[in-house]
Amino acid sequence: MLGFLAFAFTLNLVWTSLVFVILAGTEPVFTQSASEFQRRLQVDTHVPVLLDVQLSKADVQIAYSRDEQVSITATVQAPIGAKASSEFLASALTVEQQDNHIRISHSDNAGTTSKTGIVCRIDVPYRTEVRSIVQNGKQTVTGILGPVKTEIKNGDVKISYISKSVEAESGSGNLALQMIGGRVEARTGNGNISCIRAAEGVIAETGDGDIILAVVGPSKATVKNGIGRIEVGGARGSFSGSTAGGDLHVKAIPHDDWLLNTASGNIRVELPPAARFEVDATANLGEILIDRNDIALPNEKVRRLHQKVNGGGKHIDLRSNSGNIVIR
């Protein structure tokens, strides 16, 4: 019986190897080679770390790990024929340290190709400030004190659990932010922006894309072109929203004044029953539709409405040129 099992195992191993050889022979273009570069730097635990990253083509991952050191692990993956060795990484990556200031940069060597990229994982102490610039790739930052400032020409950015302020900018890509203790500035030329739980508020701006905000302080959201929409839930302060052709939807208690404006989209605001506010709404070519018992409307089509609701309160200004305005 044991002899039979050994024979079966050997046969299966031979068959697996044969299949691998066949596949490798028929599709060599997809075969990848990779190498790894590692550095560990000791830092002073009594002083915040300043991390400067400047890379051309890379996926950068920055995260909290331990307080007494910065650990850098970089992997390069490239098609067959491209230079992908530990020597290549050592020459391509430059790591410099001056006290608690650490700089990581990348220089293109003659052996690189347009398909060669670096995955760079940087484990840092909690008390770390980040300034990261990447031309093409992705950036992820999580679990540190901050502040954090990231720039990317082409790619997505994800930032979460930062105690201080965040600035994120992408020429073309999506920005996803979550649990930010300080003020947030998020801008992308073409892409979506989402920000969840930013008590100090958000400035969000996209050339063309959607903006989604949830549980935020005083905020401003702008969609410059296209039909991108703005969705806001749990606005905890003043809010200003503007779109070119997309819809605006705000569902919150009016803690402060709101200003919503769209060129050709619809506006919908949802407020709790018995909420106190003053509404000033204008729909130049559309209609104003009311689904509340505490706002009186005449029977005919309404395009202009100014009314204090439940005695009045925070001012809600709604403007749509060619869309409808719905108040619930």
Image: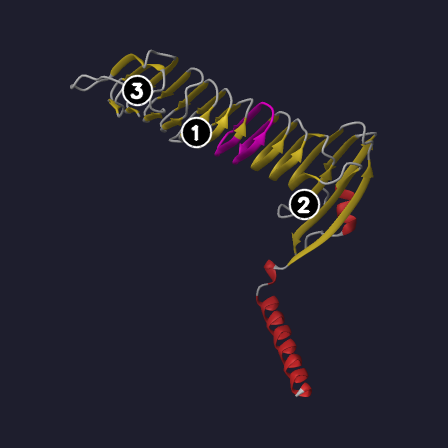
Q: Nearer the viewer, residue 297 or 148?
A: 297
Q: Nearer the viewer, residue 39 or 162?
A: 162
Please say if the residues under marks 2 and 1 sit with CB atoms less than 8 Å apart: no
Of the residues under marks 1 and 3, which one precedes in the sequence? 1
Q: Nearer the viewer, residue 114 or 246?
A: 246
* Callout 2 crowding tier (Cα within 10 Å): few <14, some 14–19, many ≥20: many
Please say if the residues under marks 3 and 2 sit with CB atoms less than 8 Å apart: no
Can see residue 111?
Answer: no
- Horizontally, residue 148 falls left or right of residue 301, namely right
Q: Residue, x 68% and y 86% (percent of image)? A: 2
Using the image, tell me which numbered label, if any, was put on residue 118: 2
- The image quadrant that residue 180 belongs to is top right
Residue type at numbered disc 1: Gly
Using the image, tell me which numbered label, if any, was put on residue 321: 3
Can see residue 148?
Answer: yes
Q: Which residues are magenta?
A: 167-196
Using the image, tell me which numbered label, if any, was put on residue 33: none
Of the residues under marks 3 and 2, which one precedes in the sequence? 2
Dominant secondary structure, magenta: strand
Of the residues under marks 2 and 1, which one precedes in the sequence? 2
Number of the front mark, 2 or 1: 1
Residue type at numbered disc 2: Ile
Q: Residue, x 64% and y 35% (percent of image)? A: 134
Residue annotated with mark 1: 233
Q: CA distance from mark 3 to mark 2?
A: 48 Å
- The image quadrant that residue 61 belongs to is top right
Say which element carries label 2: strand
Q: CA distance from mark 1 to mark 3?
A: 24 Å
